[in-house]
Image (cartoon, rainbow, N blue to C red):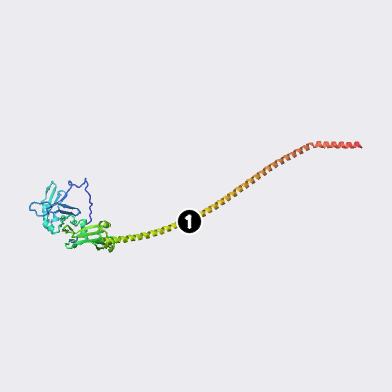
Amino acid sequence: MEIERPNASVTTLRAAPKESSASIDTMVLGYETHIVNFCQKELQVCLRTGINYTVLPKNGPVGTAPGIIIQLLTNTHKDYVKIDSKSQLNEPQNEDQKIIKSSLKRSNKLRNEFDEAIVEYYISRETIDAEGGVVYLPELDIQLSILSAIATPEHPFSAKGYETHVVYDNDFLGSSSLTGVAFKLVDNSGHLGVRYVNLNRQVYQLTPIQDVNLNNGLYVTTNGLCSGSRRHAAAKTQYYPLDKIQETFGTLYKTAEEARIDGDPDIISKREHERAESELKAETLRLKHQTLETERELAEIQRTRDLDKQNLVKMQGELDRVKLTFDQREQEFKAHERNLEHERKILENELHIYKMRRGDYYDERSQVRKDSSDIMKMLPIIVTSISTILSLVALMNSNKK
């Protein structure tokens, strides 16, 4: 029988708040499940949610056959809940449907506004043993098991239970003769590649598959696993996420050789030694290359330094030349400045002499003009004197004769 995967949930699971709008006082439809264990063994009750309960056995009344009693109690509010028994139960009915229908008709009033209906299921210990210690009740969607908690499979429609059934066929899961361990490696990305695993010194190849219904990872199913002296009746699947396989399951090797030497101390020691030698050689080669690279870098640095030194010498020479040229120009400027100062002094001296000479000239002219004026003033006197003298001379000559 093929087991279909349940549809994705459209509900949101949450913890009921302390102040909730849903409570006993506001309930209009309620279900209660009562389970009594008369099997003389611990009973594992597995729900679709993945939660499992362990119910301890009780001693029944004298003469009670070993088995399990399950009571389903339904409370319905007469004003808010209508029981459509006509459409649900008006078809050809088996004995179970008849019992359910009759229980609805016999409902009695509770708290005036509620009706109550109770139906009871009974599963004998013999039936459970015949099923290998595990039975699934589709009417209640409950799985019951008298196996140990570790040996009890998951609810077939829980998340983990579905993985177990969808990964491996039912011939393997339900067989009492086919026992062992089965692996399935899921890689929906298609990038993982073939892997190998060492199981009890035997190497097995794991070829990844793609299945959109499964998460990436490793699924390990055991069938026929024994706990103590008792064989587990049902297979169990353990899921290991792809990114946690190494830490949770173990190593999946890339080659069969790697998987084959897994667990052999001598081979592992030899492999470690060879790997250490290989790593040492690789490290030596790396250091050699690093040394050569360092030497090349140092040579380049030295060459750059020498070039910088040469450039510095050239720059110093150019600076000295510029400084010498500046000193020469400065000396020439100072010499020119001294010449200008000398010529200025000469010109000033010549100007002074010129001024002095010009002053003497004007003084001399002034004296000449003064002398001329005095002569002109004395000229009549001189003329008169000369005339007088001439007259006297003439007189004297005339007297001599």
Q: Locate residue 250, reporting x and y percent.
A: 26, 58
Residue 313 can be seen in this image = yes
Describe residue 76's horizontal placement relative to residue 210 as left or right: left
Q: Is residue 213 visible?
A: no
Tell me where residue 353 appears, x and y as whole percent.
Answer: 68, 43
In the image, what residue occupies the spot 66% across and 43% down?
A: 349
Left or right of 367, for residue 44: left
What residue sits 12% from the left and 48% below the top? 109
**Which quarter shows the N terminus?**
bottom left
Relative placement, left or right, of 305 versus 258 is: right
Query: Residue pushed farthest left?
Result: 63
Callout 1: helix, strand or loop? helix
Check disc 1 and give the amino acid type.
Asp
Question: Picture coordinates of residue 130 (x, y %)?
Answer: 13, 59
What residue is at 89 percent from the left and 36 percent from the top?
Answer: 396
In-front residue for pair 206/188: 206
Give the quarter of the figure containing the C terminus.
top right
Residue named by callout 1: 306
